[in-house]
Amino acid sequence: MALAAAGGARAQSAASVDEPALPLQSLTTLKPPPRGEAAKALPIILRARSLRGRPDLETVAEGEAEFRRGGLLLSADQLSYLHSDDLAVARGNVRITRDGNVYSGPELQLHVQRFEGFFLQPEYHFGRTGAGGTARRIDFIDEQRAVASGATYTSCPVEPGGGEPAWLLSTDKVRMDFEANEGIAEHAVLRFYGVPILGAPVLSFPLSDERKSGWLPPSINIDSKSGLQLSVPWYWNIAPNRDATLTPMVSAKRGVGGEAEFRYLEPGYHGRINLHGLPNDRLAGRARYALQLEHESTLPLGASFSMKGLRVSDDIYWKDFPSAVPSLTPRLLLADAALRRDFDGWSGYARVHRWQVLQDADARIEAPYDRAPQVGVRGTRRFGNGFEFALETELNRFAIPTDGLADPLGATQRPTGVRWHALGSIARPFGTPGWTVTPRASFNAAAYSLDEPLAGRRSVSRVIPTLSVDSHWQFERDANWFGRDVRQTLEPRLMYVNTPYRAQDARLAFDTAQRDFNFESLYAENAFSGVDRVSDAHQITAGVTTRFLDPATGAEALRLGMVQRYLFRDQRITGECSNSTDPLVAPDCKPLTQRFSDVLLLGSTTLSKRWNLDGSIQYSPDLKRTVRSILGARYSPGPYRTFGLTYRLTRKLSEQVELGWQWPLYGRTPAEAAAGGGGSQCKGSWYSVGRINYSLRDSRVTDSVVGFEYDAGCWIGRVVAERLSTGRSEATTRLMLQLELVGLSRLGSNPLQVLKDNIPGYKLLREENSTPAATRTP
């Protein structure tokens, strides 16, 4: 068996997706400390209450004796140094400090230059891990090797009455090779409150933060889809810039499987490959797999290439193995390869973009189009007296992904084909630091060659011009608000847009969607994203933002904003369109006749360091009611204390409340314990952690993470339950249990990444480097 230090533990990310990966390192050459003859030139400093001896033969120091040479500090009640043998003999309260590690005991004999000798009955403490132990004897073979007999290791204090520490690792003998970054322990036993929980005839571990090959701690997971799962990762430190993790695993319900990850970092390229698979899933009756690739490289002539992709074996893989599908859209998996070259403010690129669609019989989805290929050029240029020119031109081949639901509602087949487009603009900004006015003329041109005719036509083209004028102002004044000096800003913005109406087929929507209603979209020239749809517009958008700033630091205490759009004429190209069969390719759209748009209000404040409030409200003047709102409050009075509440409403669609927290239930936080001088003592503190998302519309909990953490100072226990919705009546639930022995290892399933991803403001009870070791069995 083996114990692996932090490098090894973190490198297991492929085997345990909750554990952050230790970054790969580029190959470098480091200058070593002085060795051999060079080390002899280092001066010796010897001090004590009394000194006596014979020149060049022996020096004896008594009373608070102290010996220094380079990074070595040796102190004792009595110390003699034999010059001819370079031998230091120390007795009584001996203490030696080297490379941040401290040894203390009754007697030491050490050939200083060779660092060869022995230490009787030593106690030791390693500064990097904050842990240590005792031994019957340590024999120093040289600067890089040592052997400890009858050694123990823990980060816990001895229990009152002379009892054992809460956790204790004991061995018959430990061989340490610092040059090889390896320690080998014989007959090692790990006890937790006196109960053996891990043992091995031979156990190896790294001696620094460097990565080391070997077995990582076993991981135990329990979920409602696969039952009890056990995995034991094996980490292979191939080189400083390459590594791999191989993880055999067994599931009580599904059988035997595994995971493999390979990472590489070279001067011209880097990436990783991850494979998760089951040769024979007993529940599904077939082989299952997930493959993820990431690669980036530099090419000659200043070009670059990138590739990433995620593919799984079947449509329900994301339900059965949610942790193996790391995607924000787990039912739409992207494979993407791109070639790019930048030159003189311009960029040329070629790309292939394909989707895998995971369909569900009860809730089928329509996939985005594949692009195979996408070729384009884009860039900007300044010329003349402040003019700015921008151009983007692309050629795309759009295809429907396999099982992309081409005909979801029995309607006409979704079109496929080739599109060329060009987006160009010329602008001339005017202004000073307090205001800017930017007139802009732009165009959107597109030509389509379709595989099947629409309204009797295979080829369609159009050019749509736009004229806009965007203006910003910023005013400031010093003010006093509730007895507090502040700097208030007033930032109005006014934008005029005029785009003529041009007929457009609503079915030609390869990459187009209506923009969300927010501050950015209200100031956009086009109400649609993408290229295929361009809204006709004769409108003006007016808004204002005011901020209250700390005049000394510039920190924002309060922000308030409001924006609204006014139409001078009806808008004919809107999101309310059906598939048109008009031979003139005119859209069958419901015109927008409402002159004043909804009003958007936003606000955020950090008036108190403990409270953070933010919200946005979309108010309809016609309906005289709120149609959408997001309101959030977060209370964080100190480290390890955070409580957040968010309310989201989209009228007639969804209404949700989200609650997230990390809060002590009993005892002191690590920050309080450290401030009170008890940070290293094993005094228990209970914490509650969680996030709950509740749908008021459906009267059910959609997603949730709830758990407890117990911090005993030298060990931490975690119990976390996670529930992920995979449908209106389906969910995957998993239970994560972890025992963290501070200074040694984390055992069990790791919920830390789940907590950090789901709980805003979540803080680790101990920093990552406080737990540098992970159990390994070779």
Image: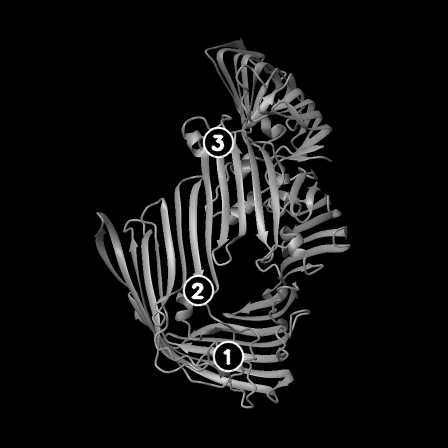
Q: Which mark is residue 373?
A: none
Q: Dot 1 lies on which element?
A: strand
Quadrant in which the N terminus appears = top right
Q: Amino acid at mark 1?
A: Cys
Question: Does the CB distance between marks 1 and 2 fall below 8 Å?
Answer: no
**SS label for mark 2:** loop
Residue on which the image places disc 3: 685
Q: Nearer the viewer, mark 3 or mark 2?
A: 2
Residue 577's tag is: 1
Expressed as whole percent of the image width and height from the top left, the position of residue 9 reads 63, 39
Q: CA distance from mark 3 to mark 1?
A: 59 Å
Apparent side of residue 711 relative to residue 186 in the rendered image (left or right): left
- At 45% from the left and 79% from the top, the residue drawn is 535
**Picture quadrant where residue 69 is located:** top right
**At label 2, which amino acid type do we have?**
Arg
Sequence order check, earlier mark of 3 and 1: 1
Mark nearer the N terminus (3 vs 2): 2
